[in-house]
Amino acid sequence: MSSVDDDDEPQLSAHTLAALNDFLMEQKIEDQNLQEAQEGDLEHFTPQENWQLSQFWYDDKTATRLAEEAIVIAGQNGRIACISSPTVYSKIRQIKPSTCTAKCLEFDARFKCFGEDFLLYDYNQPLELPQDWKQSFDVILVDPPFLAEECLTKTAQSVKFLAKDKIILCTGSIMEELAGRLLGTHACQFRPMHKGLQNDFKCYINYDQSTLNKD
């Protein structure tokens, strides 16, 4: 009866083993950050992107610029809804005055840690929203997850339901004409930047006075 020698067992290459260790370490950090967020420590909560959900987080400069714009145009006592843009919501949460309200409408349940500010949102059911939210938000900041006509069209239904007036939309340049027809937006000078996405993205607004049109 023959035995299999240990040397015949499959061995991971040094490169593969290092990549596996990196993945396990990232997962450990991810789990720790999520646990801390669920316990109330939200200051640095930015989970890893889920590409299956078409998640590409903004870089910090972009998140800060969009958050500052939303707060300025909403006003001290304003209400802001962030649709499919949790990194901007997180930045708004950090810097907004206590009298300003912000909500995070997001499909990713990891963001439930935002508590009462979180609403599970699916663009496929665009009008499954609280009725008392109808036209109650001074600013809607939205980044539809997919560069597809169906996604933008359905998301626009949510925007129209929620918005009093002002809209900030971040999406690909290929959606510019459709965005204009659906939401009356026009491109501004500011360009959103993501950590890992190379598509040509633009920022669109439906109002005139904006810091997003300044360098």
Image (tube, rainbow, N blue to C red):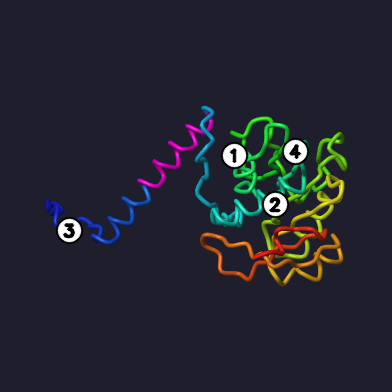
Q: How many marks?
A: 4
State the CA–CA distance, disc 4 to disc 1.
15 Å
Viewer-proximal residue among 27 and 44? 44
Mark 4 and mark 2 residues within 8 Å of each other at the beta carbon: no
Q: Is residue 192 left or right of residue 28?
A: right
Q: Marks 1 and 2: in contact by CB < 8 Å? A: no
The reply to whether the magenta stretch includes residue 36 is yes
Cβ–Cβ under 8 Å for marks 4 and 1: no
Residues at marks 2 and 1, CA–CA distance in whole angstroms: 14 Å
Amino acid at pointer 1: Gln
Q: Could you tell which of marks 4 and 1 lies nearer the N-terminus? A: 4
Main SS of the magenta part reads helix
Q: Which residues are magenta?
A: 25-38
Q: Position of residue 182 (x, y in %)?
A: 85, 62
Of pointers 4 and 3, the one earlier in the residue sequence: 3
Q: Residue at x 35, y 46 (%)?
A: 25
2 or 3: tag closer to the N-terminus: 3
Q: Is residue 41 above or below residue 122?
A: above
Q: Residue at (69%, 68%) from the top-left corner?
A: 189
At label 4, the amino acid type is: Gln
Instruction: Give SS at disc 2.
Output: helix
Q: Which mark is residue 8?
A: 3
Q: Is residue 190 above or below residue 90?
A: below
**Whole-percent x, y for residue 110 in the image:** 57, 39
Residue type highlighted by circle 3? Asp
Residue 76 - label: 4
